[in-house]
Image (cartoon, coloured by chain):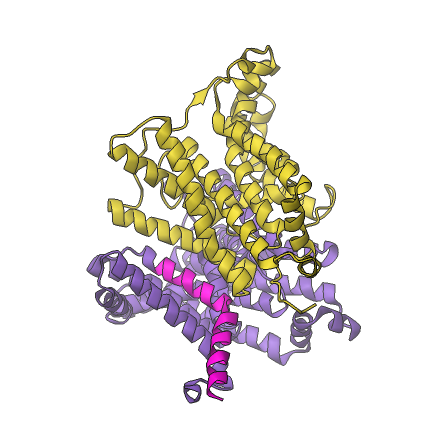
Amino acid sequence: MAKLLPKGRLLSWSVPLIAVFLGIFIGAIIMLVSGYNPITGYSALIRGIFSDTYYLGETIRMMTPLILAGLAVAFAFRTGLLNIGVEGQLIVGWLASVYVGIAFDLPAVLHLPMAILAGALAGALWGFIPGLLKAKFQVHEVIVTIMMNYIALYTANAIIRSYLLVPGERTESINQSASLSSPFLQSLTDFSRLHWGFVVAILACVIMWFILWRTTKGYELRAVGLNQHASQYAGMNVQRNIILSMLISGGFAGVAGAMEGLGTYGYMSILSGFSGLGFDGIAVALLGANTAIGVVLASFLFGGLKIGALNMQSQAGVPTELVEIVIALIIFFVASSYIIRWVMNRVKKEDI
Amino acid sequence: MDIMQILGLVIPAAIFAAAPLILTALGGLFSERAGVVNIGLEGLMVMGAFTAIITTLTLEGMGMGGPVVILLALVISILIGSLFSLFHAVASITFRADQIVSGVALNFLAVGLTVFIVRLLYNKGQTDYISNRIYRMDVPLLSDIPFIGPLFFSSAYMTSYVAILLAVIVYFVIFYTPFGLRLRSVGEHPMAADTMGINVNRMRYIGVMLSGAFAGLGGAVFALTVTGNFSATTIVGQGFMALAALIFGKWNPLGALGAALFFGLAQALSITGQQIPLLSDVPPVFLLIAPYVLTILALAGFVGRAEGPKAIGKPYIKGSR
């Protein structure tokens, strides 16, 4: 039995894999109990991801903000912070990018980067406040970021309602020069809403990897995440690193919002509640073990599940909420990795 | 509009809006005083609201009605809430999961599971409206008191007074009973508590399950008084606002009560503000975000330092320091 257990590098991959398996397995049990055939359900789900270029395009579109939201959470995690505020940072980023997209009339070469940058800056500002409070007053960032989410939601809605409203409870559409959408990509994927945002997301992955692993600042950020006191003793400015980390994390989240504003929708609606992308980002980062490549893979899983769920509902009649349940279970099991490791150790010992 | 009219408009609305917040914040208090962060209050409220509505609808379908139905719905919501909180308890206490992550997962799970079941039972995303709600009534005798009576005790919801009474009871339990002392000791210094023979993990389980019971009741009260049906958007932010009230109230039952009443006032003002002369010029968004901004200010120490239980968020591992 022990021979079958993964060792070394595989071991670190096995926890997320087991978590995913357990999540899907319990999802199957729930389907069985509620009178659906899990095999029909899951095969409809998988067909919903791969059968058609349209669904593949939609999956990649869904992945784009998930990757960026996941990077935001992962970056904060690396420095020992838990950024629950991705949702709020995403909302202000969305609003800022759409505002720049509407208000200016520039050539696309300038306009598009400016709109994305506006999103990043707005998100960074929203991350700066909890970062500052954490650094200066030792206030726990989790509570502050949750509160910032609600402030972002209500403020963005109020701004749209008073300054940017057009019929349909939304803003005007952005100018074409700030848009990420592409007729070419759409025709390639049977007219899905696929846009150039996935290039931005991949670029962001590279940027995160580069900052963390190839710069001195990145070394400092990781050191602070591993041990604040040791970093302080080594002469690093812990406070400044905490603020910087939240700034960058919020920036990623803001860009995730810009992807929705400039790519998928081209406008912003008055939101009745949270988009859920920010919270999914936590799941993505956890499952991806806070690495750039892991985040991409986890985004593919969750993006695929969400798009495939639509097909699962139309073909097998299983409500899309099943996928939400599966995602929640996967988070549970990843978070409870202690028990998975404990079981594996038990099995190992028995054989010796 | 004179001052009496304004008060008559705002105070009952504030007490009404505060009731679910008070109950849920008290729940959070049990969990956090035992050292377990409970971001999952929102999900537990969802579970309570769902259970209350489903129970009421089912009993109505069987031809029952009246206060019995409401009472049964509340009791079952409390039970389901505490059972559902076991997810959080097992993950964060026994499996040593990150308590915040586990709480976030609980919120996901609650919405996914309840809407899934609603679709299964009713073939649509939301339930029908219930016909037996909690109704307003005059408190006998007290409502006849001049001045105070009409403001506080006439045409009010009984649940609001139950919530306020419970806050006082919880205050007594937490600070003046052996159980309260044990619960607090587990949240402040689990190793010392363990040395004194207190079963740390058992106390924490009790704390989390009590939080499930109270938050389930809070969600049920919200559904039975405010919305009257259940969908994915029935509970949006109520649980987080209760958490804010808990922190703003500095992890003290009476503090949480005060904060919840204050947040209720802010909610009431953002709805009725347009009718009040001074406030009609203030954009409603400021009143909407007031509870959250105030919580941040409280945490930063501008409104007096809010310090939580010391061992909060850490799993207790026997023998480690």
Q: Which residue is at 51% across, 73% downward?
A: A289
Vertical relation: B73 (above or below) A88: above
Residue A258: horizontal and vertical position, in percent?
48, 59
Q: Which chain is yellow?
A: B
Q: Nearer the viewer, residue A9 or A274?
A: A9
Q: Nearer the viewer, residue A24 or A131?
A: A24
The N terminus of chain A lies in which quarter of the figure? bottom left
Q: Main secondary structure of the magenta part?
A: helix
Vertical relation: B86 (above or below) A349: above
Give yes or no for residue B35 being in the magenta stretch. no
Q: Is residue A319 left or right of residue B316?
A: left
The magenta region covers A323-352
Q: Which residue is at 69% across, 44% downward?
A: B298
**Residue most toward the front?**
B197
Q: Which chain is purple?
A: A
Residue A270 visible in the current orientation: no
Q: Is residue B314 left or right of residue A105?
A: right
Residue A293: horizontal and vertical position, in percent?
48, 76
Residue B159 visible in the current orientation: yes
Quarter of the image for residue A142 reads bottom right
Q: Which residue is at 58% across, 46% downward?
A: B30
Q: Nearer the viewer, residue B174 or A43?
A: B174
